[in-house]
């Protein structure tokens, strides 16, 4: 009985060429998919130009002209509207951080001008004359969700990214807060922006008085969020040593005191 091979119909003359074409097409498709994959990770940065406009017009030496901003809020409103539509969860890490910090700082500006004439954010929601943190609990649409400032700071920035340098780019519209960044943060320059802001905060004698040989008189930020610094590098002092702009050597286990926090508004009407 003849073998199957002997009785099998010979291949068509064009079959090898068709197969080669199919393989080439498949390889081309794989190449296109490979090119498309990194495109998602390198998506265009979120446009914060409107926030830059706000800061250029109304921020001088760390002080905000809230009265002028209230009369000229169109750029702030444009920026906040764009944050409502944004969906940053799939963006690169640095772009996400820049987005949330910028959104937080813009939300604080909006929150102040919606309460004309206040001398402190603690006056918002005051109960029987007692200051409250209601300012930080008010919710607004951001990235498709109704979020408060506390939600952004604690539930997203601290919980998701766990970088204590972020404390020094968040501004709470108060005199003892870190200075409001003069420009919107960017994903491309984020590491340098965070390091620069941290060094400026540490060396600002109105917020910290640091004597590497004798004592640390620190902002309450280091007390309120001490756990963040401990988790990052082991202790508050270790964090300060790593980010201190000077060249002095720090004595071990320096005595530490915390300075009163000034909630006076960081600007004028």
Image (spheres, rainbow, N blue to C red):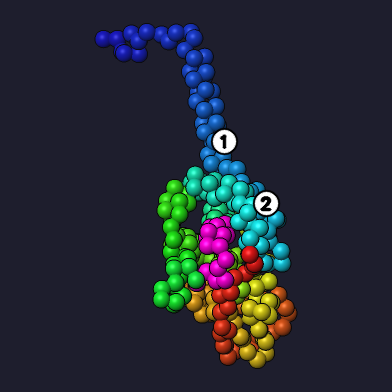
Q: Which residue is mark 1?
A: 35
Q: Quadrant of the N terminus?
A: top left
Looking at the image, which residue is at 55% across and 31% down?
Answer: 32
146 vs 192, nearest the viewer: 146
Q: Position of residue 220 (x, y in %)?
A: 54, 79
Q: Which residue is mark 2?
A: 53
Q: CA distance from mark 2 to mark 1?
A: 35 Å
Indicate left or right for 126 with 198 as reference: left
Q: Position of residue 65 (x, y in %)?
A: 66, 62
Q: Is residue 262 visible?
A: yes
Looking at the image, which residue is at 55% across and 71% down?
Answer: 120
First in sequence, mark 2 or 1: give its number.
Answer: 1
Q: Main secondary structure of the magenta part?
A: helix
Secondary structure beneath dot 2 equals: helix
Q: Quadrant of the C terminus?
A: bottom right
220 vs 35, nearest the viewer: 220
Where are the magenta residues, as a range? 104-122
159 vs 231, nearest the viewer: 159
Q: Is residue 219 above or below residue 166?
A: below
Q: Is residue 129 above or below residue 75?
A: below
Density class for disc 1 (Cα within 10 Å; few <14, some 14-19, many ≥20) is few
Q: Is residue 116 magenta?
A: yes
Marker count (numbered): 2
Looking at the image, which residue is at 56% across and 88% down?
Answer: 257
Q: Is residue 186 visible?
A: no
Tag 2 and tag 1, C-beta contact below 8 Å: no
Q: Is residue 71 above or below residue 133?
A: above
Density class for disc 2 (Cα within 10 Å; few <14, some 14-19, many ≥20) is some
């Amino acid at each position: 009985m003849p073998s199957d091979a002997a009785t099998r119909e010979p291949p068509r003359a064009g079959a090898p060429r068709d197969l080669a074409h199919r393989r080439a097409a498949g390889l081309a498709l794989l190449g296109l998919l490979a090119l498309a994959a990194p495109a998602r990770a390198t998506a265009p940065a979120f446009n914060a130009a409107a926030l830059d406009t706000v800061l250029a017009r109304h921020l001088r030496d760390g002080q905000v002209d809230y009265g002028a901003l209230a009369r000229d809020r169109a750029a702030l409103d444009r920026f906040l509207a764009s944050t409502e539509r944004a969906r940053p969860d799939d963006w690169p890490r640095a772009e996400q951080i820049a987005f949330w910090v910028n959104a937080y700082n813009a939300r604080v500006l909006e929150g102040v001008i919606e309460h004309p004439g206040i001398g402190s954010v603690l006056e918002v929601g005051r109960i029987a004359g007692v200051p409250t943190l209601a300012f930080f609990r008010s919710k607004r649409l951001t990235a498709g969700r109704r979020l408060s400032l506390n939600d952004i700071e604690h539930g997203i920035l601290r919980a998701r990214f766990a970088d204590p340098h972020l404390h020094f780019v968040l501004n709470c519209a108060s005199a003892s807060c870190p200075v409001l960044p003069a420009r919107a943060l960017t994903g491309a320059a984020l590491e340098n922006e965070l390091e620069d802001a941290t060094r400026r905060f540490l060396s600002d004698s109105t917020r910290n008085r640091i004597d590497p040989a004798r004592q640390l008189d620190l902002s309450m930020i280091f007390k309120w969020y001490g756990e963040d610094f401990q988790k990052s590098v082991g202790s508050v002092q270790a964090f300060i040593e790593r980010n201190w702009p000077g060249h002095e050597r720090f004595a071990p286990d320096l005595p530490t005191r915390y300075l009163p926090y000034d909630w006076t508004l960081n600007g004028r009407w």
